[in-house]
Image (cartoon, rainbow, N blue to C red):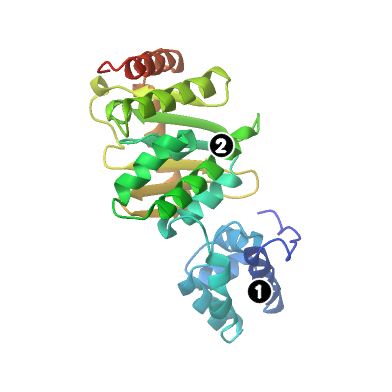
Amino acid sequence: MPGPKDLDPSSSPRALLGAEIRHAREKAGLSQEDLGLRLFSSGSFIGQLEAGTRRMQPEYARMLDEVLGTEDFFARNCGASAKSKYPEHFAEAAEAEEGATTIREYASMLIPGLLQTPAYARAVCRAYQPTAPEEAIEELVVARMERARILDDPTRPLLWAVIDEAALRRMTGERAVMAGVLHHIAGLMRRNRAIVQVLPFDAGAHPAMQGCVKLMDCDDAPALVYLEGVGTGRLEDDPATVSRYRHYYELLTASALSPGKSLALIGAMAQDYAHEEHP
């Protein structure tokens, strides 16, 4: 695998911690693969920790201190690198999006976060937390819209989303909210900024019926898959696991409407919502 890049420790707490891991590992005479084995992980995972692209979890911090003889340095400092504006179960996946060259996502019951509008995101966040104060909801909405700014780049990442028809027909917020988010998606498609396919009801059973799947490819790191449920999620870099979900995603795209037919359907539904007709 390629050697570790030089890091700028001042760029972030996670980059600083990654530089310290690299320094302690090299001082101990261990390769990334050697250290990965001792942490019951992989060399690629160690490389991602050193590069600052993966979050340090407390259990790994404790094992690093034990294996590298750093007393409690990593255990004491992993908290600063783990701070995030995103929910804990999603923070690592959100941060991985920033470095991804390609993002492939299947959404079953809601429109993917990168394609949401503020009004739609607000309705979703309020449904998740019906008793939360407005300030807390607005913080979540702002964080979600900041994530979507990666689409401001005209070339990367490539976003390819398969959206279940159920997510388009479930009215989230008022009809104007649904009309707005569908117009927004159609606009991204027309500007060639996103590939979107609708998985229609008549496609029948499929391999991702039990949840949402996000696949992320990067230039200088292993591919990742993020699996999400209600209030929970996990990020995997095991090649066999990623390959299995990539195969599932290919099956989904084969069963979904073409991008052209999907755009026509999304546009028609946006008009239906805007004119207060049942789509």
Task: Inspect the image, locate mark 2, and give the three-letter code of the amino acid beneath it.
Answer: Thr
Q: Residue at x 32, y 52 (%)?
A: 129
For residue 106, side relative to residue 184 (left or right): left
Above or below residue 222? Residue 202 is: above
Quarter of the figure that contains the N terminus: bottom right
Above or below residue 75? Residue 266 is: above
Q: Is any part of residue 247 visible from this angle?
A: no
Q: Which mark is residue 161?
A: none
Name the residue that disc number 2 marks: 102
| Residue 260, horizontal then vertical, whole percent | 45, 13
For the residue labelled by badge 1, is the local secondary structure a helix, a strand or a loop? helix
Name the residue that disc number 1 marks: 25
Q: Residue at x 40, y 26 (%)?
A: 253
For the residue labelled by badge 2, is the local secondary structure a helix, a strand or a loop? strand
Quarter of the figure that contains the C terminus: top left
Closer to the camera, 181 or 35? 181
Cα distance between the residues tagged 1 and 2: 31 Å
Task: Inspect the image, locate mark 1, and give the three-letter code of the amino acid beneath it.
Answer: Arg
Judge depth for marks 1 and 2 and give the one in front: 2
